[in-house]
Amino acid sequence: MKTRLIDGVEVHRSSGNVFADLGLVDAEKLKIKTGLVIEIRKAMKSRNLTQQDAAKRMGISQPKVSDMMRGDFTNLSERKLMDCLTRLGYDIEITLRPTNADVGHLSLAAA
């Protein structure tokens, strides 16, 4: 991470993943889950769904939807979030490809 001083304040260039910048262990998974939740929120808004209506469609409880809308989605796996999106009318495509790096990484591209 590149660092420089601006007006006496140390400024760090982001890696592109705020969770990694904060030093969180599961940074890539958190970034993926955040992207999925953002798409769920968009789907709910575009369909004018209440939390109760969305909960029924996604097959989860309304309190879990409420938690998700407040940014607490630790109790939901990536797989469950993808299931929620398919129940909201999304197609999900997973693409795998080899990498030249020793360890690959996760990414999410939303159309």
Image (spheres, grey):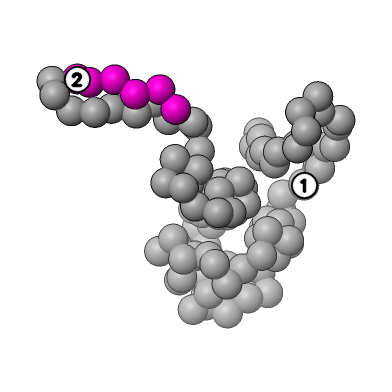
Residue located 24% across and 28% down the image: 10
Percent x, y for residue 104? 75, 37
Q: Residue 53 carries which label?
A: none
- Which numbered disc, 1 or 2, marks the residue closer to the eye? 2
Q: Is residue 55 left or right of residue 92?
A: left
Part of the protein shown in magenta: 1-6
Distance from disc 1 to disc 2, alpha carbons, whole Å, reads: 45 Å
Q: Is residue 6 above or below residue 109?
A: above
In this view of the protein, can residue 39 be seen by the observer? no
Q: Is residue 26 magenta?
A: no
Q: What element carries label 1?
A: loop
Q: Is mark 2 on a helix, strand or loop?
A: strand
Q: Do the residues labelled 1 and 2 touch (CB within 8 Å)?
A: no
Local crowd at mark 1 within 10 Å, few (<14), some, or many (≥20)?
A: few
> Which picture quadrant has residue 97?
top right
Residue located 68% across and 59% down the image: 78
Local crowd at mark 2 within 10 Å, few (<14), some, or many (≥20)?
A: few
Percent x, y for residue 37? 55, 54
Q: Quadrant of the N terminus?
A: top left
Q: Which mark is residue 91?
A: 1
Q: Residue under label 2, please give it.
A: 6
Q: Quadrant of the C terminus?
A: top right
Q: Which amino acid does label 1 sit on?
A: Asp
Magenta stretch, main secondary structure, is strand
Q: Is residue 3 magenta?
A: yes
> Which picture quadrant has residue 76?
bottom right
> Which picture quadrant has residue 71?
bottom left
Residue located 13% across and 24% down the image: 8
Residue located 13% across and 20% down the image: 7
Q: What residue type is labelled 2?
A: Ile
